Image: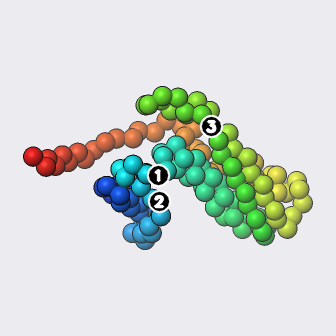
């Protein structure tokens, strides 16, 4: 599965596009009120990625177990220090409503935490490399 994310920003304009295996979709995020940059910061989007991953994976893993899920709520929070510092802590909680016993739902939730790809990406060190740089001058 090939995943891409792209941001294009100029004064008063912000475009965010994500794609999986070439299937692209735009994510509506306005520019900052100052006109430059995104109204959503990277930490917020990282936490949204954690919440989204867990939510989607609950449905995936429930289907494998024959559990019908009606609703998933996920909330992620943490603290960031100064520029360049990673988060100091990340905690998340979830509420799952499903046609199963409480024990089965809790087992599903705990198992899903172990296979959630974005959570596991943060739990393990992985390289992130800036491999393309293109500078364009207006002078």
Label 2, label 1: how far apart the Cα atoms are: 7 Å
Contact flag, marks 1 and 3 (Cβ < 8 Å)? no
The crowd level at tag 3 (other Cα within 10 Å; few <14, some 14-19, many 20+) is few
Which mark is drawn over residue 78? 3
x and y, in percent, of residue 88 in the image: 58, 30
The answer to whether residue 36 is visible is: yes
Q: In which quarter of the image is residue 26?
A: bottom left
Q: Is residue 101 left or right of residue 50?
A: right
Which residue is disc 2 drawn over? 29
Front residue of 85/13: it is: 13
Q: What element carries label 1?
A: loop
At 48% from the left and 45% from the top, the residue drawn is 42
Contact flag, marks 2 and 1 (Cβ < 8 Å)? yes
x and y, in percent, of residue 33 in the image: 43, 51
The answer to whether residue 118 is visible is: no
Of the residues under marks 2 and 1, which one precedes in the sequence? 2
Of the residues under marks 3 and 2, which one precedes in the sequence? 2
Q: In this view, does 65 lie to the left or right of 9?
A: right
Label 1, label 3: how far apart the Cα atoms are: 19 Å
At 78% from the left and 54% from the top, the residue drawn is 95
Q: Which numbered disc, 1 or 3, marks the residue closer to the eye? A: 1
The crowd level at tag 2 (other Cα within 10 Å; few <14, some 14-19, many 20+) is some
x and y, in percent, of residue 126 in the image: 46, 39
Of the residues under marks 1 and 3, which one precedes in the sequence? 1
Q: Which numbered disc, 3 or 2, marks the residue closer to the eye? A: 2
Which mark is drawn over residue 39? 1
């Amino acid at each position: 599965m090939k995943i891409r994310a792209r941001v294009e920003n100029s004064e008063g304009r912000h475009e965010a596009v994500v794609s999986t295996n070439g299937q692209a979709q735009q994510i509506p995020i306005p520019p900052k009120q100052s006109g430059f940059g995104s109204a959503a910061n990277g930490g917020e989007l990282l936490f949204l990625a954690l919440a989204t991953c867990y939510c989607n994976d609950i449905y995936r893993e429930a289907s494998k177990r024959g559990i019908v899920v009606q609703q998933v709520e996920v909330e992620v929070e943490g603290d960031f220090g100064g520029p360049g510092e990673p988060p100091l802590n990340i905690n998340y909680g979830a509420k799952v409503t499903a046609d199963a016993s409480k024990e089965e739902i809790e087992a599903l939730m705990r198992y899903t935490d172990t296979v959630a790809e974005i959570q596991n990406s943060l739990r393990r060190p992985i390289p992130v490399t800036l491999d393309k740089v293109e500078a364009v001058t207006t002078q």
